[in-house]
Image: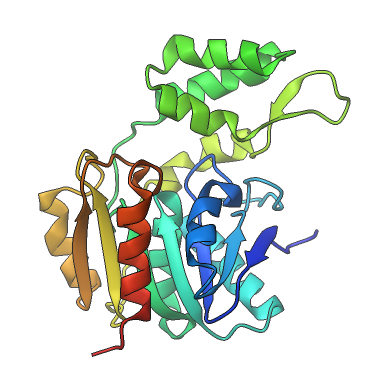
């Protein structure tokens, strides 16, 4: 099996790997890459089971982090800055905690190192309905999603991973829906319990998002003692989309700052 993760690379400078969220693809973070490519060589990866990357027999934070590490080996990157959003943030934390020498600086966008409750079942059900229906048009798929998902932003995000099938007749999800649904419990878990990551870490929280709560801050400090938590104002979970200047400015400043 081809184990090479699909990647879009741009820019020059220190290596920066971007990891997207659940049901997404590397292109979701392309706006971040464009903002940072003047200072960094930015790699937008499709995580396993997503986008154009291979599907795994077992999906978990550990297997995803191992796939990122293997990609780094294949590209002869001993270490790099890592930025992850949502699920990608958990994968980035897993890599930093289990292979700390591979991570220069770590940026975690709107996710904490904790186990989350099941709150994607409605989305999973909607995705499965679209797959079962065999939609002939994107408009049909959008209408079906909209019947059960009341957030147009979530619907738009999901539609970015909808593509016409190989036969060219019906639309299909680009991600491994069956595998992700089966592994959803593992992907909700906290990263592996290891020694704390001592590298410099930036957590970014959307002011209108509930993903990073005050109750999570002690766990963030325990596992990432050299971390800071910055709030992106007037932003929800997709804080890099809601407030790109705030988000990209905070990331650039953090990554370019001399370690103190």
User: Does residue 108 sit above or below 24 in this rendering?
Assistant: below
> Residue visible at 57% across and 86% down?
78
On screen, residue 47 above or below 210: below
Residue 87 % position (x, y): 43, 50
Q: Which is nearer the eye, 86 or 223?
A: 86
Residue nearest the observer in this picture, 226 or 100 = 226
Query: Which quadrant holds the N terminus?
Result: bottom right
Name the quadrant containing residue 100: bottom left
Quadrant containing the C terminus in the rendered view: bottom left
134 vs 65: above or below: above
Where is residue 240 shown, x and y percent of the image?
A: 39, 49
Rendered residue at 27%/57% (across/down):
204
Residue 173 lies in quadrant: top right
Q: Along the horizontal axis of the image, is 195 left or right of 105? A: left
Q: Is residue 233 above or below residue 200?
A: above
Left or right: residue 173 compared with residue 61: right
Q: At 19% from the left edge and 76% from the top edge, which residue is drawn?
A: 225
Q: How is the image coloured?
A: rainbow
User: Is residue 192 visible from the viewing direction of this image?
Assistant: no
How many numbered circles does the render carry?
Answer: 0
Q: Residue at x 63, y 13 (%)?
A: 139
- Residue 226 screen position, x and y as percent: 22, 78
Residue at the right extreme of this rendering: 167
Residue 130 visible in the snapshot: yes
Locate residue 5, reporting x and y percent: 68, 60
Q: Choose between 53 and 57: the one closer to the eye.
A: 53
């Amino acid at each position: 099996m081809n184990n090479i993760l699909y990647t879009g690379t741009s820019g020059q400078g220190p290596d920066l790997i971007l990891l997207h969220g659940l049901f997404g693809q590397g292109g979701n973070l392309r706006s971040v890459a464009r903002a940072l490519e003047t200072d960094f060589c930015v790699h937008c990866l499709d995580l396993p089971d997503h986008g154009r990357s291979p599907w795994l027999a077992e999906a978990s934070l550990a297997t995803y982090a191992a796939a990122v590490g293997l990609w780094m080996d294949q590209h002869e990157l001993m270490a790099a800055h890592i930025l992850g959003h949502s699920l990608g943030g958990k994968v980035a934390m897993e890599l930093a905690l289990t292979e700390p020498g591979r991570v220069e600086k770590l940026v975690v966008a709107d996710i904490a190192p904790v186990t989350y409750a099941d709150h994607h079942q409605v989305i999973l059900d909607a995705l499965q309905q679209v797959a079962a229906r065999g939609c002939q048009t994107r408009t049909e798929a959008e209408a079906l999603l909209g019947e059960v998902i009341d957030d147009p932003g979530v619907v738009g995000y999901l539609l970015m991973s909808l593509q016409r099938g190989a036969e060219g007749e019906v639309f299909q999800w680009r991600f491994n829906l069956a595998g992700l649904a089966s592994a959803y419990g593992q992907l909700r878990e906290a990263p592996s319990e290891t020694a704390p990551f001592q590298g410099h870490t930036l957590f970014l929280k959307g002011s209108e998002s509930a993903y990073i709560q005050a109750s999570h801050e002690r766990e963030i400090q325990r596992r990432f003692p050299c971390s800071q938590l910055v709030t992106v104002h007037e932003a929800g979970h997709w804080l890099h989309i809601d407030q790109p200047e705030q988000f990209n400015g905070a990331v650039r400043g953090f990554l370019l700052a001399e370690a103190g």
